Each structure stands twice: as structure tokens, then as C-alpha cells.
Amino acid sequence: MNLEARFARWARGGQSRLALFAASFLEATILPVPIELLMIPVMLADRARLWQAAAAVLAGCLAGVAAMYLVGVIAFETVGAPVITALGLEARYEAFLGYAEDNGVMALLIINMTPIPLFVAALGAAVSGLSPVTVFGIIALTRAARYFGLALLVWLFGARILAMLENLRDRPRLRLAVWAAGIALAAAALVLPVIV
């Protein structure tokens, strides 16, 4: 059985949604990597359960935000600050904290359009005294729109994407170019938040 078939079989099993939950939790707590890099292949491999995949990612994200918010309230100096320092995100944290103190709720809306990691926002929101109901409500709405919007795009265009990928099998050079572009985009997604 080739790797593609194994991945498709795994994606159709219950483990893929659990893996998406765990990856989203990590993304919202300590691993600032775009979760979409894992979501899209899983959704394409199991289009019948793509809404479940989006829900699993949203649940993992909200669990991670809750954990980081609690760290911000209870143990920022002993846990939160060292994590921010270890990841070299002090400047981003200070910028978000200042913006959150000046703009409150608007800061949480903006965070979803910037390369600032979500856990930095959750810690900053807790430290700046934003209400947990407000924090979770805004993050739930904005992230639900993001994840379920992506699921909608896969639902609408997934068959065409899969057909395009199938056509690449007969064209090894084009397939190599698409893989190279995908790897370059993934690398940029990983590196850009560190640089910006």
C-alpha cells in the first residue's frame, strides 16, 4: 500500500480528528505553526467528515486558548513569560499587550489577521484583564469562521483539487514543481511568523 493510500485510510479513521484536535491545541499553546497545513490534506482525504475535522480543530484551539489564558491569570511569571522568552516573542508580546490595553476587544479581532501566535494573544488578554467570556467568544467566532470557511472551500472545490492532483501523476516534472511550491509555501508559513 502506498503512502497516499495509507494517509487516506488514516484520515478516514477516528484518529485523524483526534490528531487535528491535538495539533490545534499545540498550535494555540506552544507551537506557532499554521494548522491549515494539516487540515487541508485531511479534509481532502475524507471530504465526508470535513465538518468534523473543522470542529476538532476549533475545539483544540479553544482548549489551548483556555489553557494559555489560565496560565496568564495564574502563573504568567513562572510559566508564560519563560515560554515567550524561549520562543523569542518578547517584542510581539509587548506589542500585543500594549495594543490590547489600548484597544481591548479590537486587539483580539486583529490577532486573527496577523502573524502573532494565538498563545501570545491569550496570555496578553489574561494579563491585560480582558474578560474570559469576551476572549473565548471572539476567538471562537473568528476561528470558527476561519476553520469552517476552509471546510466550505474544500467542500466546494475539493473534487476539482483532487482531480488536478490526479492529473499530476502523469506529469512528473509538473508534480515536482507543485511539490516544490508547496514546500516553499509551507516553509514560508513556518518562517514568516519568526521573522515578522
Image: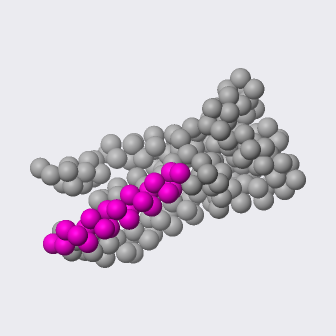
Viewer-side residue, 105 vs 178 = 178
Query: Residue at coordinates 46% horizontally, 43% vertically from top-left?
Result: 23
Q: Is residue 66 left or right of residue 16?
A: right
- Residue ID at (64%, 42%): 119
Percent across and percent down for residue 172 are 19, 68
> In the image as oriented, which residue stretches furthest toward the right?
102
Quadrant in the rendering for residue 106: bottom right
Pick the quarter of the image with the C terminus.
Answer: bottom right
Does 179 appear in magenta? yes
How far across and down, in percent of the image, does residue 84 sit? 67, 36
Question: In the picture, residue 39 is in which quadrant?
Answer: bottom left
Q: Look at the image and give the residue range highlighted in magenta.
A: 170-191
Secondary structure mainly formed by the magenta segment: helix
Of the pair 31 and 13, the residue shown nearer to us: 31
Q: Classify 27 as above or below 140.
A: above
Residue 14 at what x, y percent from top left? 32, 45
The answer to whether 30 appears left or right of 98 in the picture is left
The residue drawn where x is 63% and y is 47% is 118
Count of marks overlaid on the render: 0
**The residue positioned farthest toward the top in the image shown:** 78
Q: Is residue 42 left or right of residue 195?
A: left
